[in-house]
């Protein structure tokens, strides 16, 4: 599956968003963060859901006990760029943990959007899986 996800990300980025927004049957964006050590731009294709103007992504890493690297980069620098289709937007991210009063509502939104995959991922790990709200500037 990780090979398929890498191919999807390359196709999305290489086509400048012409291909890839809905290639896996769910809406996908490109999240660009700055590497916390390297300072280089890192790009990840992530399933998203909308909550008003905010784009919601989930730091699940497929239910891994380790969070995805992009989450560490984002926590070090909340200024990110998202690309939805061909549109790129400077944005600000906010990490939403399970202790946040809005977490349960947002979890329902993202989980239903991704066909209950996130609940399955959460069952695979004891790590609380955070949600990230991305607000375009």
Image (cartoon, grey):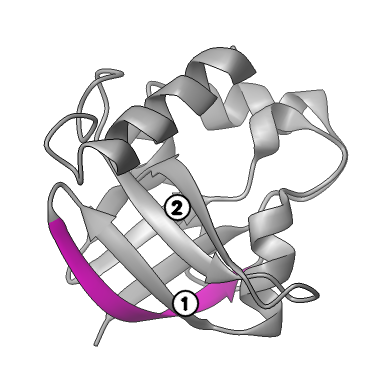
Query: Between disc 2 and disc 1, whose residue precedes?
Result: 2
The residue sitting at 15% across, 46% down in the picture is 85
In percent of width and height, residue 105 lies at: 41, 56
In percent of width and height, residue 3 lies at: 59, 15
The residue sitting at 18% across, 43% down in the picture is 17
Tell me the number on the disc at residue 93: 1
| Residue 134 appears left or right of 67 | left
Which stretch is magenta? 87-96
Taking 121 as reference, is 106 above or below it? below
Q: Main secondary structure of the magenta part?
A: strand
Taking 51 as reference, is 101 above or below it? below
| Residue 82 appears left or right of 22 | right
| 20 and 96: which is toward the camera | 20
Q: Which residue is mark 2?
A: 57
The CA distance from mark 2 to mark 1 is: 10 Å
How crowded pointer 2 is (Cα within 10 Å; few <14, some 14-19, many 20+) is rated as many
How crowded pointer 1 is (Cα within 10 Å; few <14, some 14-19, many 20+) is rated as many
Q: Quadrant of residue 76?
A: bottom right
In percent of width and height, residue 90 lies at: 29, 80
| 116 and 81: which is toward the camera | 81
- The quarter of the image holding the C terminus is bottom left
Taking 53 as reference, is 42 above or below it? above
Q: Quadrant of residue 99?
A: bottom right
Please indicate, yes or no, whether residue 99 appears anywhere in the rendered image.
Answer: no
């Amino acid at each position: 599956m990780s090979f398929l996800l890498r191919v999807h990300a390359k196709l999305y980025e290489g086509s400048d968003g012409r291909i890839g927004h809905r290639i896996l049957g769910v809406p996908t964006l490109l999240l660009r963060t700055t590497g916390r050590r390297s300072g280089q731009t890192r790009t990840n294709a992530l399933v998203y859901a909308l909550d008003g103007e905010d784009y919601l992504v989930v730091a699940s890493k497929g239910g891994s006990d380790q969070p995805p690297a992009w989450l560490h980069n984002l926590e070090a620098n909340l200024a990110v760029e998202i690309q939805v289709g061909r549109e790129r937007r400077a944005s600000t991210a906010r990490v939403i943990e399970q202790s946040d009063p809005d977490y349960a509502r947002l979890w329902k939104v993202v989980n239903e959007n991704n066909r209950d995959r996130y609940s399955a991922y959460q069952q695979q790990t004891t790590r609380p899986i955070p949600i990230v709200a991305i607000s375009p500037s």
